[in-house]
Image (spheres, rainbow, N blue to C red):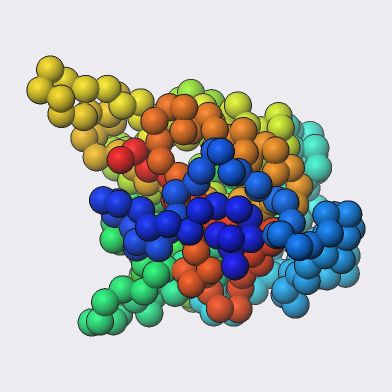
C-alpha cells in the first residue's frame, strides 16, 4: 500500500479537514522513493523491483510519449504535447529539458484522483476518501502546469466554483492556451473560467482573476530536481502565507485572507526523492502540515503507489 510502502505511519489525523485515513508525513521516517520492506533496492532502481501500471508513460514509444495528443479518458480531457514552436521556446527558457511539453505519470495520477470528485459532487451520500471536505474550491491555480492536464481535470470534475488559472514559464503559455481551447467540448460553459498565465516561481504572490488569493494550489511532478526546491518552496509559502498571531491569538495570514489556501500535489518519486523530502522538511519547518493520501483515495486504475504520492499541504 502507499502509506506502508513508502514508510509513513498509518495513523489517523486528528482535527483536520480531510478524511481520517490520510496519514501525516513523519520526517523521522521519510523513506520517499525507497523500496517497501522485503524488496531489493537495486532491482527496484533498475525498474524490476516493482511493476509500473500498464498506462505508465514510461512504457510509451517516442511518438506517443512525446508527440501525440494525450487523452485522459475518464474525463475526456485531451492535451497536445510538444508542438514544435512551444518546444523551441521552452528549450530556450529555464526548462532546457522541455519537461513541460509532455504528460508525466504524476499528472495522470492527479487527474485520476480528481476524476472521482465528479461522482462525489453528484452524490447525495457521504463523500469518498478522494473528496476533501474543503471542496469545491472557488479559485484554483495550477503551478508548473505544463500541458495543463491537472488544472483542466479539476474544472472538468466540477470541483471549481470560480476560476482555474494554469501557470508555467512564459514560453509554455501558448501550449496551455491551445489545450484550453481544445477542450471546449468538455468544459462547455466553463471554458471562459479557465485561463493561462505566465508565472515564474518565487516570492511574488499570484492572485486570481478577481484579484483575490487562490484557495487551492495544485501541481503535478513539480519537484524532480534539487535545484527546483528553493523556488518551489518560495512559491508555496508566498501563496499559502506565513502564519502569525494577533494579541488575541487568532491566526491570520500575512498578505492573504484569514483562511489559508490548501495545496494538493502529486509528486513523482522516481526522479529525485531527496528533493521531495527536502521540500517536505522545509514546509514543516514553516509550520505547514503535510498529509499523505492512502491507497483508498486513489483512482482504482490510475494509481502508481511506488512512484507517485499525493499530498495535502495546509496550515492547521
Position of residue 301 relative to residue 213, above or below, is below
The residue shown at (56%, 38%) is 28
Q: Is residue 148 left or right of residue 91?
A: left
| Nearer to us in this view, 95 or 295 | 295
The answer to whether residue 13 shows anywhere in this view is yes
Q: Residue furthest left?
A: 248
Name the image quarter holding residue 106.
bottom right
Residue 246, relative to residue 186: is it above or below? above
* Relative vertical location of residue 148 with respect to residue 117 in this rendering, above or below: above
Q: Is residue 268 left or right of residue 246?
A: right
Q: In the rendered image, is residue 183 in sight?
A: no
Q: Nearer the viewer, residue 26 or 213?
A: 26
Q: Quadrant of the C terminus?
A: top left
- Picture layout, residue 183 above or below residue 284: below
Query: Looking at the image, which residue is at 34% across and 63% down?
Result: 19
Residue in the image at 71% along x and 32% along y: 226
- Give 157 or 245, whichever is nearer the viewer: 245
Q: Quadrant of residue 41?
A: bottom right
x%, y% of residue 73? 59, 79
Labels in figure, total:
0
Q: Residue 273 location in percent, x, y?
A: 70, 44
The N terminus, quarter of image: bottom right
Identity of the residue drawn at 42% across and 68% down? 130
Task: Give x and y (percent) for residue 54.
Answer: 75, 77
Location of residue 302 by image quarter:
bottom right
Q: In front: 95, or 300?
A: 300
Apparent side of residue 268 relative to residue 61 in the rendered image (left or right): left
In x, y percent, where is residue 276?
63, 41
Extreme front residue here?
Answer: 38
Amino acid at each position: 500500500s502507499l502509506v506502508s510502502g513508502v514508510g509513513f505511519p498509518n495513523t489517523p489525523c486528528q482535527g483536520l479537514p480531510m478524511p481520517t485515513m490520510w496519514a501525516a508525513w513523519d520526517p523521522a521516517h521519510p523513506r520517499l522513493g525507497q523500496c517497501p520492506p522485503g524488496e531489493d533496492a537495486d532491482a527496484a532502481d533498475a525498474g524490476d523491483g516493482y511493476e509500473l501500471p500498464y498506462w505508465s508513460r514510461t512504457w510509451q514509444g517516442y511518438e506517443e510519449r512525446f508527440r501525440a495528443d494525450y487523452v485522459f479518458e475518464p474525463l475526456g480531457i485531451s492535451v497536445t504535447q510538444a508542438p514544435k514552436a512551444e518546444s523551441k521556446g521552452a528549450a530556450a527558457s529555464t526548462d532546457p529539458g522541455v519537461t513541460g511539453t509532455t504528460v508525466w505519470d504524476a499528472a495522470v495520477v492527479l487527474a485520476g484522483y480528481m476524476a472521482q470528485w465528479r461522482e462525489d459532487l453528484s452524490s447525495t451520500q457521504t463523500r469518498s476518501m478522494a473528496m476533501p471536505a474543503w471542496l469545491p474550491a472557488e479559485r484554483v491555480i495550477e503551478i508548473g502546469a505544463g500541458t495543463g492536464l491537472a488544472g483542466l481535470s479539476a474544472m472538468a470534475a466540477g470541483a471549481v466554483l470560480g476560476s482555474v488559472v494554469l501557470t508555467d514559464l512564459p514560453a509554455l503559455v501558448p501550449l496551455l492556451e491551445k489545450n484550453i481551447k481544445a477542450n471546449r467540448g468538455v468544459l462547455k460553459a466553463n471554458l471562459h473560467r479557465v485561463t493561462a498565465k505566465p508565472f515564474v516561481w518565487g516570492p511574488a504572490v499570484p492572485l486570481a482573476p478577481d484579484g483575490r488569493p487562490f484557495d487551492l494550489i495544485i501541481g503535478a511532478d513539480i519537484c524532480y530536481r534539487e535545484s527546483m526546491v528553493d523556488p518551489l518552496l518560495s512559491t508555496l509559502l508566498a501563496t499559502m502565507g506565513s502564519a502569525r498571531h494577533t494579541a488575541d491569538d487568532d491566526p491570520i495570514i500575512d498578505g492573504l485572507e484569514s483562511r489559508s489556501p490548501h495545496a494538493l500535489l502529486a509528486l513523482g518519486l522516481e526522479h529525485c526523492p531527496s528533493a521531495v523530502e527536502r521540500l517536505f522538511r522545509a514546509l514543516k519547518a514553516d509550520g505547514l502540515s503535510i498529509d499523505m493520501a492512502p491507497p483508498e483515495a486513489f483512482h482504482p486504475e490510475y494509481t502508481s503507489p511506488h512512484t507517485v504520492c499525493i499530498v495535502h499541504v495546509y496550515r492547521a
